[in-house]
């Protein structure tokens, strides 16, 4: 893994997410959102989010895990990504998103989060570009982690973030620790008691979920519009 910039990834799960993103590409510049398999990143889902960033200056959360929403004290889905950043950081964050989309590379962002009473914590954020259908990347698969001792927060929510460093990541080799993505969809014989998932993208209707999952998994499945079917099928339109 090669990195360039003023910061290096610290959290193990950041490396794992970027490695998973890299394997999903299968030789392409970026993977498509419909190729994300929530089962492969299930243990990290509560800290995962997806951004709509066709206009980085107005990037919005398409979904965000429950841990992340709890840390900021409100439901992030549908809200402005830049709203959680202080005014001085916003222009730099927009430039980083534009650079990541243009170069087709993930960016790792280091920040200091503050509560309303000025209690602070170090934050690491990953933004990995995604396409969605035809055209170039317009979205991000992201994840947030706190670093160091977080006991001082004592349950308090974050009021803002301040950018302190960043680095663009070139993922030359897959990172071990997560299973490789499934091969392209092929007909699979299914046992009655072991259904697979079928990924169906439809912007006009909500997803129907028929399997038992935790709330965070259900959120991601709904956002990716995943339906249960006899085989794993990746369909986008």
Image (cartoon, rainbow, N blue to C red):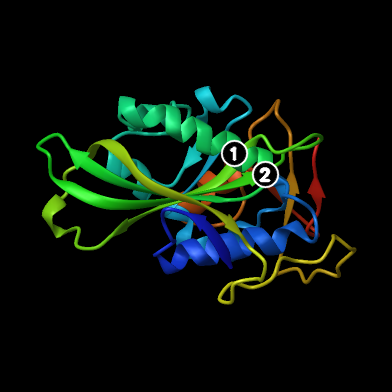
Dot 2: element: helix
Left or right: 131 in relation to 69: right
| Residue at x 68%, y 46% (from the top left corner) | 104
Residue 95 position within the rendered picture, expressed as x and y whole percent measured from the top left: 52, 33
Q: Nearer the viewer, residue 154 or 59?
A: 59
In the picture, the disc for residue 21 is none
Residue marked by disc 1? 99
Q: Nearer the viewer, residue 127 or 78?
A: 127
In the picture, the disc for residue 103 is 2
Residue 215 position within the rendered picture, expressed as x and y whole percent measured from the top left: 45, 50
Q: Is residue 126 above or below residue 75?
A: below
| Residue at x 71%, y 25% (from the top left corner) | 204
Is the C terminus in the top left, top right, bottom left or bottom right quadrant? top right
Is the N terminus in the top left, top right, bottom left or bottom right quadrant? bottom right
| Residue at x 25%, y 43% (from the top left corner) | 113
| Residue at x 40%, y 34% (from the top left corner) | 76
Q: Nearer the viewer, residue 83 or 186?
A: 83
Asked whether the viewer can see residue 45, the reply is yes
Q: Is residue 22 above or below residue 77?
A: below
- Disc 1 packing (10 Å; few <14; some 14–19; many ≥20): some
Are circles 2 and 1 on residues that touch, CB within 8 Å? Answer: yes
How many labels were placed on the picture? 2
What is the spatial separation of the Cα atoms under label 2 and label 1, in whole angstroms? 6 Å
Q: Is residue 98 above or below residue 197?
A: above
């Amino acid at each position: 893994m090669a990195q360039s910039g003023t910061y290096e990834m610290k959290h193990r799960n950041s490396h794992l997410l970027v490695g998973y993103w890299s394997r999903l590409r299968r030789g392409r510049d970026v993977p498509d959102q419909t190729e994300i398999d929530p089962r492969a990143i299930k243990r990290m889902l509560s800290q995962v989010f997806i951004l709509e960033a066709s206009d980085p200056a107005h990037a919005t959360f398409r979904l965000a895990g429950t841990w992340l929403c709890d840390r900021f004290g409100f439901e992030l889905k549908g809200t402005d990504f830049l709203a959680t950043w202080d005014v001085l950081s916003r222009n730099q964050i927009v430039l980083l998103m534009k650079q990541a989309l243009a170069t087709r590379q993930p960016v790792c962002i280091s920040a200091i989060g503050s509560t309303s009473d000025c209690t602070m914590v170090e934050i690491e954020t990953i933004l990995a570009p995604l396409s969605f259908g035809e055209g170039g990347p317009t979205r991000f698969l992201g994840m947030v982690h706190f670093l160091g001792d977080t006991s001082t927060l004592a349950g308090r929510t974050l009021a803002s973030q301040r950018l302190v460093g960043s680095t663009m990541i070139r993922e030359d080799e897959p990172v071990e620790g997560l299973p490789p993505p499934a091969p392209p969809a092929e007909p699979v014989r299914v046992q009655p008691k072991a259904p697979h998932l079928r990924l169906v993208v439809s912007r006009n209707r909500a997803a129907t979920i028929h399997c038992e999952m935790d709330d965070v998994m259900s959120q991601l499945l709904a956002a990716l519009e995943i339906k249960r079917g006899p085989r794993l099928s990746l369909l986008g339109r």
